[in-house]
Image: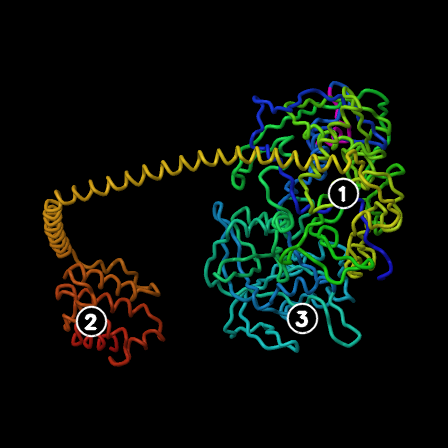
Amino acid sequence: MKNNILIKAPYNFVPLNKTVVSPWWADYISHDIPFRDGKSGTLDVTITAHSPIFVRNGAAKNAQEKTRDFSKFQGKHFIPGSSIKGMLSNVLEIMSFGKLNKVNDHRYSIRDLSPAAKDIYLNNFKARDIYAGWLRKEGETYLLEDCGAPGRISHREIDEKFNTDFSTYFSDKGRFDQRRDEQKSAQFKYGRFNGHSRNSRFSFSYDSAGRQVYHFDENGKDEGQIIFTGQPGPRKQMKNGRWTGHHLEFIFFGKKGTLQIENPVMENFFFAYYEHDENSQSIDWQHWRKKLKKGKQVPVFFRKDGAGKVKDLGLSFLYKLPYRNSISEAIQFHQEKVPTDLAEAIFGFIANEKEDQRESLKGRVHIGHAFESANIEVDRELREEVLSGPKASYFPNYIRQDIRKGQVQKYRTLMDAHPEPAGWKRYPVHKNGVKTNPPPPPRNKDEKVNYDITSPFIPLKSGAEFKCKIRYHNLRETELGALLSALTFHNTSGTFHSIGMAKPLGYGKVSIGIGSITEKEKLAFLKAYEAFMNAALGFDYPEWHNTEQLRELINMASEQENTGTSELAYMKMGMGRGENHFVEAKKAMQALDRYTNLQNIQSRSCATFILEEDVQKAKAAAAAEKRKYESKGTLQKTIEKFKEQTNADFYQLFETEKANLLAALKQRKGVLEEQEAQRKLELEMAERAKRKEEKKAAVRETSPDFDSVENGHRKAFDMLKKLIQRFAQEWHGIKYEKLKKAMDNGVLPDQFRDALIDKIVAIVNELNKGELNKWKKDFSKNPYLKKIAEWIGKEQAMELLKKIRS
């Protein structure tokens, strides 16, 4: 298997650039005040398709008959300007050593028990740290009822109790079919449980693996509820006689407290279960999410952090653990952080209010829609292709690996301390037409081809031509050179852009021609940009045109003989043994190598137009210009510092004067304040005494409401006790504990004692024989009589005992 190369992909990556080039004039960009070398004008652009091309019509996604058509306006096919801008800005970010910041900053999760990744998961998963609980939503807040460590109970134990067939159905000799998602779900087990009550009492013993395994026991001290989880595979017996596979379900015990879950933890949970993508949601999550939205509780497993807060959670015991790093966090380990890069300076950006200290910047380049101009021929065949691939969590491809002789010794993941993302994702152009990636054929005669996973579209044939205008305003010569460089891959021959849908299959390969500018003018701007890049990168990099970033980009934009490891194709994702190449590739410790390292890639370099003497001149000019802009910045900082110091001096003087005034005012009014305070205190004490006497007088006009206590109620005596304690306190105006010590002959006034005795006799008459015997015990062993003695004295309590015994 190790010699069989399984890793391949229709995409690859341009590696991250540690140095990020930031234009030192970024803070001085203006739409009103031009740069000294600012240029404004229009570029006439022709886009020619060299493969079938498709840009989806911007109709509603549920309008299937429209979304199959190419984008149109008033009967004319066109490529939206936003699509062209996205294509160019991505190329410019790479070529100008910009920031990789247009990423979905998700925190992916891992639950991988394959041999290659098992340690990555289990090193961060400890069974003793897993708790069980009930998740619910109140308003916008998520709460979790902590049930402590879950218990385990075997399929066989459940079968014996309820006459079910879990132990046989889910064995490798049973009817369980792991290729069917519904049978692998927890909901399938709930259905087979036939509505039996899952609440019971349990006791435990230890199995051969040393685990606590519970059994049904009517006299057991533990009370809980059986919770089912999914069945990843069948239970089967190995050659050595040992069994493997899931055969233990879980028990959730009583609630131990309520935990509030912080928003980032819930965001990670929802992302792990594809809340953002309904088509990828599991059967179990589709079921539980409906209950959660209705305010009902959902069984989950979770871990706590050092402060006792919920750290992460999932729907199964071995749930997906969020990675230590998100994508953007991983990028920050390997790329400088600068305020503005060249692509942002040219195309503009919208500042992030939470994270960005900058103000948004309007772009100085406007790209119009590219309308059809000639050779437009619509392909009459409907294409239905599967346009999918591994998620960004597939670390053999999306995290930079140390590949030696085609293999990895140990995988790096986002769980590492400083993982390196693979870089900018690009789709290499195809040399010979387009490929197809149809849905998999049915596995049996009862199944149909699943067209739900395909993207239907009708492309335009190769040769389609579009024209648009790119208007630029106040671009410096360097910036105009950067724009032209992105359009033409720095005038490198034999290079192509990719645009539109189905790029992984070779669709959308286009070349760009530029009119309204002479070749001499274009080369002058390209030289200015190239000289700037060499000056900006300094001595930490080789010549700009020969950096690994430019080499990877240019080679992916060039036609290649993509065979062997460089084949531009999806890996297989079948269900049978050995058919899932994503799994098998990890078993073989393979990873996606850089494009130029793959087989049959004829490496070529980016074009260059400057000499060494041009670089030296550019470096000197750049250094002088940078000092000029930095000096402007120093002046600005001086002004800001002067303002800060002036404000600080003013506030210090203000605080001093305020303190002096307050001290004088306190001295003048001190005596009056003390007198006023004393007068208020006396009035308050008098008012308090008055209210106390009024309350005592009011109480003495009433009597205890013994009728409010229901004789046959199981807690009648407790209710009577609360009634008398409250009444005695209010009658005497003394706390009950002090009152019973001071009045050893009973706290209840004499006039109410007969009524109390009658009430107690009535309560006792309603008792069953067992409870009545407790009342008939001697005084020393009778807690009821001792409490009654506090109310009416021991002598009368003993008389009451005689009545009860008679």
Badge 2 element: helix
Of mark 3 and mark 2, the one earlier in the sequence is: 3
Of mark 3 and mark 1, the one earlier in the sequence is: 3
Q: Which residues are magenta?
A: 63-73
Quarter of image, res 668? top left
Q: Position of residue 522 (x, y in %)?
A: 76, 26
Q: Position of residue 633 (x, y in %)?
A: 52, 35
Callout in the foreground (3, 1): 1
- Does the magenta-highlighted stretch encompass residue 67? yes
- Does the magenta-highlighted stretch encompass residue 758? no
Determine whether 731 is above or below 678 in the image.
below
Please tell me which residue lies in front, 421 or 28: 28
Please identify the quadrant where the N terminus is shown.
Answer: bottom right
Q: Is residue 635 left or right of residue 108?
A: left
Callout in the foreground (2, 1): 1
Determine whether 683 is above or below 631 in the image.
below
Determine whether 180 is above or below 463 in the image.
below
Which numbered circle lies on residue 790? 2
Kindly identify which residue carries mark 3.
156
Q: Position of residue 413 (x, y in %)?
A: 68, 56
Q: Is residue 438 left or right of residue 666?
A: right
Which amino acid type is shown beneath numbered disc 3? Arg
Quarter of image, res 617? top right
Badge 3 element: helix
Kindly identify which residue carries mark 1.
453
Look at 61% across and 25% down and name the residue there: 35
